[in-house]
Amino acid sequence: MKDSVICVRISSTLRAALERISVSERRSLSAAIENILYEHLEGKGGEAAGDEKRKFPRRAVSTPALVQTAAGPFAATVRDISLGGIGLSAGAGYQSPVQENSRLAVVFTLPETTKPLLMQCVARRCSDDKPPHIGASFAEDGHQGYAALRNYLMQ
């Protein structure tokens, strides 16, 4: 799935409100709008919510991450997160594919927080899409940031 650029006309009042949200969440205006749209679709039972069969429901986000693998680090975007794992899209410069069952260390910041989280993960699904997508479960020894993650997801 490729990202697409869209253009919309909005009032200056709505733009100012969206800019306040993006500043308070410490993310770009585009990322703030994307999160709002994902939340809306999930609330309406739209395609973003899908038929969830996972043990823990996912929450759509869009936040930058640094992923460390045995082959080296790469930049990524956290696309969704749950109490059980994380969905990533690899960023530019992604060179070596992640193999299923390989260990990953993922550093990212949750929306509306300033403290970065370090989560130890195990890759479960890896795609060759452009950009590549990686689904990973949290490793049992990687729950240093689990309490912060739980608090965020339970809001």
Image (tube, helix red, strand yellow):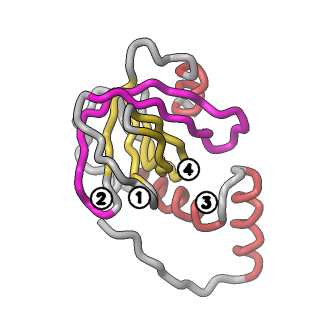
- Give the vertical position of 87 relative to 33 (above or below): above
- Which element carries disc 4, helix, strand or loop? strand
Find the magenta span and give its range. 102-130
Tell me if 75 is positioned left or right of 26 in this view.
left
Q: Which of disc 1 and disc 4 is earlier in sequence?
A: 1
Q: Which of disc 2 and disc 3 is earlier in sequence?
A: 3
The alpha-carbon separation of the residues under discs 2 and 1 comes to: 7 Å
Asked if the magenta segment contains residue 108, the reply would be yes
Type of the residue with mark 4: Thr
- Give the vertical position of 108 relative to 50 (above or below): above
The alpha-carbon separation of the residues under discs 4 and 2 comes to: 21 Å
The alpha-carbon separation of the residues under discs 4 and 3 comes to: 10 Å
| Image location of residue 114, percent across then percent down | 73, 38
Q: Which of disc 3 and disc 1 is earlier in sequence?
A: 3
Q: Residues within 10 Å of mark 4 (few under 14, many from 20)?
A: many
Q: What is the number of the mark on residue 32?
A: 3
The alpha-carbon separation of the residues under discs 3 and 2 comes to: 19 Å
Q: What is the number of the mark on residue 63?
A: 4
- Which element carries disc 1, helix, strand or loop? helix
